[in-house]
Image (tube, rainbow, N blue to C red):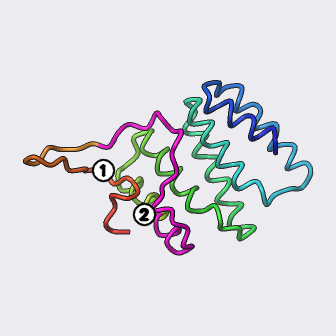
Amino acid sequence: MGAVLRGWARSVSGDAVEGVSWIEDGIEDLRAAGSIMTLLSLLALKAEALHLADRTPEALEAIKEAEVLVERTEGRWWCAELYRLRGVFLAAIGAEEREIEASFCAAIGTAKEQKSGFPRKTRRSNLRRVPPPKSERVGRERVTTTCLVTACRRC
């Protein structure tokens, strides 16, 4: 587990290529040892590192793998973060706004259901490459046209 955390720290510090390698080795070791319960959070870290390494499609695959593991183990404590990350990655690759919004709404709904406080206290993201939301000027106010977690009124 230490290798994964070390790799994630390297990734967010700017050495994403080497960081991903550490993460993948650490996850491989945990799988070999039969440890699957910690994999949910570690796959989320892997996805974030892959995104930082400009490998966003692979990051989405890591999220899908984590979601399959959630269904198999019924370990749902990490679901809100997985949905949030999927929304961030979809936005980064220019997916349809409907699909992006659905991911963020699922994150908010899951967090509310679990009473996690996620919608009120969003985690400071290391995902610096996500473009800022599109907006329009309306009179003197700036109106956000892209749903980003707390802006969603339908959730």
> Mark 2 and mark 1: span between their CA atoms?
12 Å
Above or below 14: residue 82? below
- Residue located farthest toward the left when viewing the structure as drawn: 139
Could you tell me residue 97's position as x and y percent?
35, 51
Q: Amino acid at mark 1?
A: Thr
From which residue to which does the magenta span run? 108-133
Residue 15's disc is none
View extreme (front): residue: 121
The N terminus sits in image quarter: top right
Magenta segment, prevailing SS (helix, strand or loop): loop
* Residue denoted by label 1: 146
Number of residues whose C-alpha sits closer than 10 Å to that of mark 1, classed few (under 14), some (14–19) or many (20 or more): some
Local packing at callout 2 (Cα closer than 10 Å; few below 14, some 14-19, many 20+) is many
> In the rendered image of this protein, does residue 44 appear above or below residue 110?
above
The answer to whether residue 148 is left or right of residue 55 is left
What residue did someone put label 2 on?
A: 105
Horizontally, residue 134 falls left or right of residue 150, namely left
